[in-house]
Structures are given as C-alpha cells and as structure tokens.
Image (cartoon, rainbow, N blue to C red):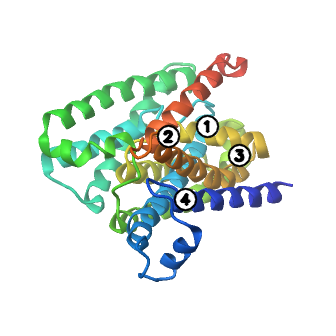
C-alpha cells in the first residue's frame, strides 16, 4: 500500500513538473516543450523553455527536497510537531548571514555565499536548541517554538534593514528575499545540487536512528542507538539543506512544517517512510505554489515563497490549536 501511494506521489510530482514547463505568462504546447528538450532550436519558444522554465523547475525540485527533508529531520529530532526550519529561525539565520555577505563583502556567487548560509543556519540552530532545552524540564516544544519565532523576528528585521539601507544588497536580494524561483540559472543549480545531495544522504543515514530517538534518549540508548552521533549527523544535514536552499531561492516558509505532517498522516510514524514521501510532496508543493503564483495575477507573478506563506499560515494555526500540541 505504501509503495503504491509513493508511486502515486511520483506521478503527482511529474505532473506538477510538466505544468511548470507548460504554464507561464505564455502557455507553450507540449509538442514544443518536447522539441525544445530534445534540442530543436527552431522553435521560437526554445529559449523560454531551456533558459527559463527548465532551470526554474529544477531549482524548485532541489529547494523542495531540501526543505521537506529538513522539516522531517527537525520534527523527528526535537519531537516537536511544530518544528520547522523557517519557524525555528534556521532559514532566517541563513538569510541574515547571506545578506551580510552580499552587503559588506560584495559576494554575489552562490558557491561563495552558501558558506555564510551554512554558518548562519548552524549558529541559529544551536542558539534555538540551547534556549529550548534550558531549565530542568529539558526539551520543551513550546519554548523551542517561542525561541525560534523570536530569533526569526529579530533576524528578519535586521535582514530587511540591511537590504533597504544598502543599495548593492537591495539590487541583489530584492527578489531573492521573497522566495522566488525565477531569475536563477544553471550555475546556481550546479552550485546547490552537491550540497543538497550530501544533506539528503546524511538524512537517509540518520532516519532509522531517529525512529528510536523519537522514543526518548534513554530508550534509544537502550536499543543501541548512538544518540550523540545521530544528533550530530542530523545537525549536519539540517545545516547543509537549510543553508543551501535559502542561498539558492531565498526563505520559503511552511514547506518543512506542513509536508512532514501530510506524510505522517499517509504512512504513520516511521521516519524512513516520512522522509521518502517528504522528498516527493515538498517539491510538489513548491512547484505547485510557483505555478499558482504565475497565473493568479497574470501577466505579473507572485513569488512561490509568498504563496506557500499564504497556504501555510492556516495550517500552523490549525496545528497549534490541536489538543495534543497544546498539551505538549
């Protein structure tokens, strides 16, 4: 049953990818899309397909996978159903560090400023975890969420302030800051793909151990799981995934929050299956939001990050009002 549903999710992702190639300011027939992909440059839409829509679709796939896997890891590691790389400040930390790189160091290539994204994501994740685990009660989901929201607000304000006050940063990042897939080329995809690939591999390795960690540290150790190693591997994966995704497309919120919940409803609590479904459902959501953003006010566009925020806010409110979350 799970394999059949997974294949259905694959088909859904393929359909959204096709829509991403077909739909835009100008709708292009499937035959011309296919001809352009096969190298036929006689079509007037050849450049639109190969230079704009294909990179946009590939970037949406990469960013979606990174954000979905990161959300799955975050919820599994913290045992917090509200955990999300955006909600807990990790994306905001990466965004602030990248803004500093652009504004003060003049860095404009992803292969350079992605390292700032890693540093920002790592520092904020450590700070939020320390704040959320302070005191005698240990890990507190509510405290983790509050610490993440507070740091997100501060860092987002500083990021926007730097962008507005610095002309170079404003020109470089006004579109990036809204979480848009447009305007990126193959160079950004080539720079982001290796880091996301390593992050996904680390997440797959850690997934089995996260099933035991979800039962509590003491029981996990009794089952033979190296809790410290699992946490370290998960932290490395989160830093790679969040830092790279934020560097490539900007901050896109709520994907890492909603998608693991949907996957959990479908397959149950097994982290390995949640991870497998998140890798498909998250890019489907990101590309779907991008397609909706292209057509809702055509010929203008709404960035994918704004569409996911609009869709994700009701999900967050619903999750926060659930009795089992409120009592956590």
Q: Position of residue 225 (x, y in %)?
A: 67, 50
Residue under the point 76% across and 61% down: 7
Q: Secondary structure at mark 4?
A: helix
In the rendered structure, the answer to whether residue 88 lies left or right of residue 120 reads right
Q: Position of residue 165 (x, y in %)?
A: 14, 33
Q: Earlier in the sequence, mark 4 or mark 2?
A: 4
Quadrant containing the N terminus is bottom right
Per the model, the C-alpha gap separating discs 3 and 4 is 17 Å
Q: Earlier in the sequence, mark 1 or mark 4?
A: 4
Please tell me whether mark 1 or mark 2 is closer to you in this view: 2
Per the model, the C-alpha gap separating discs 1 and 3 is 20 Å
Q: Secondary structure at mark 3?
A: helix
In the rendered structure, the answer to whether residue 222 lies left or right of residue 69 reads right
Query: How many residues crowd mark 2 within 10 Å: few (<14), some (14–19), many (20+)?
Result: few
Instruction: Write down the residue under mark 2.
Output: 296
Q: Earlier in the sequence, mark 1 or mark 2?
A: 1
* Numbered tag placed on residue 258 in the rendering: 1
In the rendered structure, the answer to whether residue 11 lies left or right of residue 124 reads right
């Amino acid at each position: 049953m799970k394999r059949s549903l997974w294949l259905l999710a694959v088909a859904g992702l393929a359909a959204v990818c096709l829509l991403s190639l077909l739909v835009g300011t100008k709708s292009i027939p499937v035959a011309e899309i296919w001809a352009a992909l096969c190298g036929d440059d006689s079509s007037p839409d050849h450049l639109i397909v190969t230079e704009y829509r294909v990179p946009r679709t590939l970037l949406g796939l990469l960013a979606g996978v990174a954000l979905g896997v990161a959300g799955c890891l975050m919820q599994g590691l913290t045992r917090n159903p509200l955990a999300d790389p955006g909600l807990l400040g990790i994306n905001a930390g990466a965004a602030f560090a990248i803004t500093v790189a652009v504004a003060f160091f003049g860095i404009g290539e992803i292969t350079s400023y992605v390292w700032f994204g890693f540093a920002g994501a790592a520092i904020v994740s450590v700070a939020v975890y320390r704040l959320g685990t302070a005191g005698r009660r240990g890990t507190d989901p509510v405290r983790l969420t509050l610490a993440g929201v507070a740091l997100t607000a501060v860092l987002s304000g500083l990021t926007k302030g730097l962008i507005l006050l610095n002309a170079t940063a404003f020109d470089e990042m006004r579109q990036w800051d809204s979480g848009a897939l447009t305007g990126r080329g193959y160079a950004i995809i080539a720079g982001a793909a290796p880091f996301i690939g390593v992050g996904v591999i680390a997440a797959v390795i850690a997934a089995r151990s996260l099933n035991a960690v979800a039962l509590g540290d003491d029981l996990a150790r009794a089952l033979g799981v190296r809790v410290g190693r699992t946490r370290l591997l998960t932290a490395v994966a989160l830093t790679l995934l969040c830092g790279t995704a934020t560097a490539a497309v900007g901050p896109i919120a709520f994907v890492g929050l909603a998608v693991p919940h949907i996957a959990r409803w479908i397959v149950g609590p097994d982290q390995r299956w949640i991870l497998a479904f998140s890798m498909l459902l998250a890019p489907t959501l990101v590309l779907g939001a991008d397609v909706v953003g292209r057509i809702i006010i055509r010929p203008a566009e709404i960035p994918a990050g704004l569409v996911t925020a609009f869709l994700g806010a009701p999900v967050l409110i619903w999750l926060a009002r659930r009795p089992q979350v409120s009592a956590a």
